Amino acid sequence: MSNIIRFIKELPLVTNAKEYGVYPLSVNHFGHLHVFMIHEGDQDFLIATGIGSSQFEGELFHEGEFSYVKAPLSNHNANTLRDLFPFTKPIPVLNKLRSFGLGDRLGIATEGHIRVFKEYDAYPIFAQQSIRELALTNRTYKDVLDAASFSVFRDGYKDGFGADGDHLKKATEVEMALNLGFSMITLDCSEFIRNDVTDMTKDQVNHACTLDEETKKRYLNHDFEIEGMKISFDEEELKRNVLVYGKAIDFAVQIYQDYFANDKTDANFEISIDETATPTTPTQHYFVANELTRRGVKLDTMAPRFCGEFQKGVDYIGDIKQFEVELKIHAAIARHYGYKLSIHSGSDKFSIFQLVGKYTRGHFHVKTAGTNWLEAMRAVAATDPKLYREIHKYALSMFEEAKKFYHVTTDLTKIANVDTLTDEELVDLFKQNDARQLIHITYGFILNAKNQDDSFRFKTKLYDLWREKREVYADMLYQHIGRHLELLYSGFEK
């Protein structure tokens, strides 16, 4: 009798699931239907047995009075899983006190993430990807959501998670993500934000913008007090705000009305105004928030562009004292208008996490992405130095091309030659900012590199390694993302 049949025979009283190749935390029941996940060879499968097992697509096995379906981890079976077991379906989480975005570009990081969020009350967003990331990894939103659902099922995470259609810029993208069941949309307004206004003279501003009387009446000759802090506008500053953000506000209002207003969808709405050339001043934040609120938009979070630099995969660059002063006002504005402050490019910003926890009073949304990829590559350096050296050299050759997609200040001359480093020293490269950014921004090129026979140069080897060393990667994520949460929580009283 096969292991699976023996396991099914002992349901639901079985206590030694691992002996049968079953993930112990994946065993779930829906009436007389039993569903669990197994590891076989180098793959995972769903096993469904009992009344309703035919809902899953897969191979049907019979043995005596017992039968079961061995189902691949496909989109159809993910949808079936979400229908039967609601904990595998994303929910809106931005209305919770604390939320944390986790961009898993590889579809294998959730196991490590779950370990972290079993220890904190922040709600994770396990499925979070931008259209740009999808293009660079050759994945789809279905892939992203399915990977998260299968992971929470396998590891028994039942506390709720979100799915973020991240940095979407078009109505068609928003509609697609919502139709797939994503529980959050991050609307990127950057294409409607003017970056040239800062350099305009006063005369140019006056020529480009004429304020209507209602706008003047609403903002001029007023002191707006928020938690003891005053915000005021002079006419030139108000005109600049209208020029910079006017069309972005119109865009956000239109998207909200088309997809969110009047309970059209049960999903969270975030506005991103952080992808700009200059920081968002507290006055500009107030103007955008007030205009959106006045026009009926209900935000769950907003992401301004803070002073200093939030570059990918490295700590905050800038004047921390100035950041603290402005963060205090940004957080107060968010509270005043009833949404959480969102911190984008939040990976590895360890020097400011305590301040974020403090001034948001523990009501925050922090978004990370590339740091999870970096931990995956650190695992490669630790377990297969030869493969890492080859990838590192390839990344150097593709760096200039990769820079077109990201703003970084990487100095390649500061990165040690990998041929001069011992195997043990390779891992220490991930403590050096320039080396981190090199690997961070070249992920798409690394994953898509091909040999002459059109086979993948690195991707297949990498996934085989990560599959073999899954515990190593999960442990690294547990430690690294856990450090983010530990510092954020140290800033406020729980």
Image: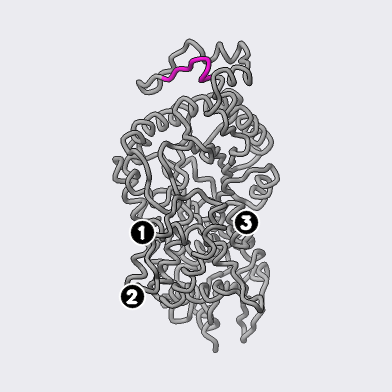
Q: Quadrant of residue 413?
A: bottom left
Of residue 273 and residue 174, the one placed in the foreground of this image is 273
Left or right: 342 with respect to 420? Answer: right
Q: Residue at x 47, y 81 (%)?
A: 20
Query: Which comes sooner in the sequence, label 1 or label 3?
Result: 3
Range covered by the magenta-colored residues: 231-238
Query: Mark 3 = which residue?
Result: 141
Q: Are marks 2 and 3 in contact (CB under 8 Å)?
A: no
Q: Is residue 82 above or below residue 42?
A: above
Mark 1 and mark 3: Cα distance apart in space: 32 Å
Q: Nearer the viewer, mark 1 or mark 3?
A: 1
Left or right: 184 with respect to 179? Answer: left
Q: Are marks 1 and 3 in contact (CB under 8 Å)?
A: no
Q: Is residue 321 above or below residue 45?
A: above
Query: Mark 1 = which residue?
Result: 432
SS of the residue under disc 2? loop
